[in-house]
Amino acid sequence: MSQVGLGSGREEIHMVGKIAKEIVIAGSGPAGMIAALALAADGHDVTLVGPAVGENDQRTTALMMPAIGFLERLGIWQTISPEAAPLATMRIVDATGRLIRSPAVTFHAGEIGEAAFGYNMPNTVLNKVLSGAVDVNRRISRILSSATRYRHSANGVVIETDDGHEMAARLLVACDGRGSLAREAAGIQTRRWNYPQTAVVLSFTHALEHENISTEFHTEDGPFTQVPLPGRRSNLVWVANPALADTLMALDPVALAQHVEERMQSMLGKIAVETKQQAWPLSGLVPNAFAANRTVLVGEAAHVFPPIGAQGLNLGVRDVETLLNALKTDQDDVGSEHVTRAYDRLRRPDVLARTGSVDALNRSLLTGFLPAQLARSMGLELLRSFAPLRSFFMREGLRPGSGFSGILSARHPKVRRQ
């Protein structure tokens, strides 16, 4: 039986009967499947390891236009778009009832020259389309089992699965979620924290048109967010304290619809709950490195925070975009230190900034500390009344760094030649 070595270095992984791979992705959720499709489109042979994604996730995903553009380039957005609703307007309403209340702020995509900030789609649709695209891609091999063990050396990683597969890769892409075994095996430490909050998620129908407006009510327990779906339908993410969440989970559809309609101030008229409510406890996580030991972190293996501001998978898509750029730093070894160091350096500012801002906003809702309430109110008032600042935040929310470029382009408009 022949021995195959991965590269050269102080220590080599020799494989007797092992399968040599260029890139292995651990985790087959949306982030893992997007990573597989993007890497394959970039000319890499990829092995995707993870069980088929379940079909019971009632959540939706709001992808901003840069992420939509990425899916377009992968050739899959056209299949998803009929099931998605545009987010043309986003509105924040203070429903805390506190002494210092913030003004309502409305963000229109048209203010920054966009038809929509992004699109909202059911996770079931997104996962089905991604899975179908993965299955027919000749550059992607799929193993429908879970990775259970990793062994690292200077020139590769050996991955073992629960059904007996064993393979070695030059690069391991960890897309296996917040409890990432791949991250732990790479020796990457994390800082974790829990919030005294649970997100109750459901979809509902309503009598009035949502007009492609998403409304986020800020309450003492956290955000209560309605996000449009096609037709007179919307998804709801109700962040509540655990006791209230337990109460909501025990309600029948009629009683739950009454609670939702009251909390929404009948903004969308009569409501009927469409799906069984699901509960998701909230937590946060940031790693001390975003890549190490031939392992890069993507998706919730790299960042976890509350569902505020539609960041989640959008950040995961930017992880994948950054990985494609980092791979250009070494044409010979996709898992070299040149690649992992470049990825860590490029992802750190974006992830830490987004995690910090979402955490600060969420905690400002939970605290009764008057200075914090005053600061939040003043900040939202500035956004409401000062259009250039509002435009900056809208552009920055879509893509880091674009806020400043938008200001510069506004100050120095292009002159059309006759």
Image (cartoon, rainbow, N blue to C red):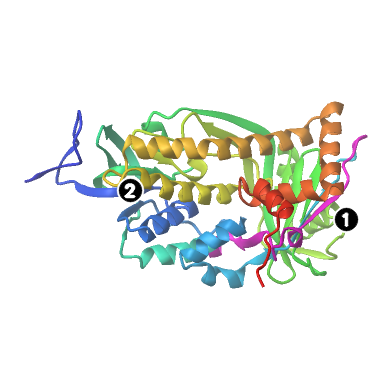
Q: Which of marks 1 and 2 is in front?
A: 2
Please identify the residue farthest to the right as the structure is shown: 99
- Is residue 229 in the magenta section? no
C-beta proximity under 8 Å, tags 1 and 2: no
- Is residue 99 in the magenta section? yes
Amino acid beneath label 2: Val
Residue at 75%, 62% in the rendered image = 110
Q: Name the residue under label 2.
A: 24
Q: In front here: 291 or 57?
A: 291
Amino acid beneath label 1: Gln
Q: Mark yes or no: residue 282 visible.
A: no
N-terminal label among 1 and 2: 2
Q: Give the range drawn in magenta.
A: 98-125
Q: In front here: 200 or 301?
A: 301
**Apparent side of residue 167 relative to residue 300 in the rendered image (left or right):** left
Residue at 87%, 47% in the rendered image = 385
**Apparent side of residue 194 relative to residue 258 in the rendered image (left or right):** left
- Residue 100 vertical placement versus 33 (above, below): above
User: Splitting the image into 4 quarters, where does residue 213 fall?
Assistant: bottom right
Q: Mark 1 points at which residue?
A: 265
Mark 2 crowd level (few <14, some 14–19, many ≥20, 10 Å Cα): many
Residue at 62%, 32% in the rendered image = 194
- Residue 27 vertical placement versus 55 (above, below): above
